[in-house]
Image (tube, rainbow, N blue to C red):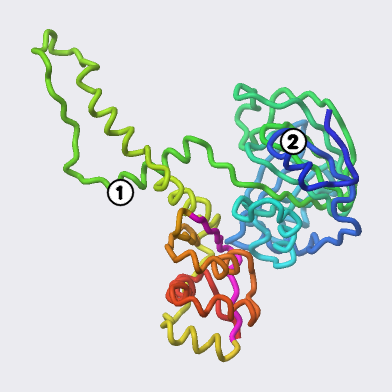
Amino acid sequence: MIDETDNFNQGEFLAHYWHKQPLLIRSYLPDFKDPIEPEELAGLACEELIESRLVRYEHNSWQLQNGPFNEAHFQQLPKQNWTLLIQAVDQWVEQVADLKKQFSYLPDWRIEDVMISYATDGGGVGPHFDSYDVFLLQGAGSRRWQIGPRCDKDAALVPNSDLKLLADFHSQQEFNLGSGDVLYLPPRIPHHGVSTGNSLCYSIGFRAPSFGEMLLGFTDQLIHGLDEERRFSSDQPRPAQHAGEIDPDTLNETFTALLGLTDNQEKFLLWFGCNATEPKYPELIEPPETALTLNEVLRELKAGCKLAKCPSSRFAYMQLSSVLHLFVNGRHFSVPISALGSAQHLCNCTKFEASDVEIVLPINEIQPILEVLLNQGSLLLEK
């Protein structure tokens, strides 16, 4: 059974629920006001660069359409049984991005995005599960949620459906979410939400790369650094008795050498920092029309220009021994440990006030990094 609380405690949540079991949190955000209107969502769904989907429940089945849509499309929809989903709204609407601050007890680099769904009466996306942790924050209206037992890897899905719906869903518990309530779900917990009237829901999802994805990414990086002349070779301890036989003993040396390539924790950690900050939509990060020099950057900042992150940028840092590693949009920068305060400000701030810039600028090793970040579009100068 799912626990329910109206007295949320961050420490207790992390110890007993995070990645372990679901939790229904009543009044997580008391007096919550929606930072966006349904009409604005419909407008975003008409944009070419924005990922949008429309799910309709018709003839006892769920039908998926991918955007972009046009205004006429929405005018033709029925009054009920459909849901509009807009991905990564936090990258387009600052007030939506601010919602992520409500989960600051979890690392910011873990958050994938804030998806928003607008559902009419009876609307939903069908019974399914996610492979990552997610918070479902209820906005205007209400939704009826059903939760089932954790799915294993053999859970059957509805055939020929892009929605990855469960073929056999058994509800264990049901409850209504009202404005400001939050339902936390760890990976593989099946859930099915149906809107009662028109409603908005904010889905804050967290990155959880699979072992296969991590192995592929890490080894791909290792491959780029390998000497092309390093190849398979082995001693032949005895004459071959059968021309078609592969003698396992002749592969011992190669197997050991391959294991040695991946047995490097520091290389893995640095790769992970780059991978964790890869932007969801890199095409939204654009360099300035005219390249900036370091002197121009410093002059603009001292003249009162504001520094801000591109909404699609991802920043993180890591301390290894006496070296500080800064990761921005998949790139890695090494700086002295004395730059810790500057790195923390770069990672924690979205917009930089004059006092923030004064902390960042005095570190000589940070200044050329600012130039790089501005010229690749990760940071922006605002007049």
What residue did someone put label 2 on? 126
Query: Pointer 1: residues within 10 angstroms few (<14), some, or many (20+)?
Result: few
**Mark 1 vs mark 2, CA separation in Å:** 43 Å
Q: Is residue 360 part of the magenta span, yes or no?
A: no
| Residue 37 drawn above or below residue 300 | above
Q: Secondary structure at mark 1?
A: helix
Give the left or right position of residue 211, taking residue 45 as reference.
Answer: left
Quarter of the figure that contains the N terminus: top right
- Queried whether the magenta region covers residue 315, the answer comes back as yes
The residue shown at (41%, 40%) is: 216
Give whichever of 317, 381 is nearer the camera. Answer: 317
Element under label 2? loop
The 10 Å Cα crowd at callout 2, few under 14, some 14 to 19, many 20 or more, is: many
Q: Type of residue at label 2?
A: Gly
Q: Looking at this view, is 13 or 196 the one in front?
A: 13
Instruction: Tell me the magenta residue range.
Output: 305-319
Does the magenta stretch mainly form a helix, a strand or a loop? strand
Residue beneath disc 1: 224
Q: Amino acid at mark 1?
A: His
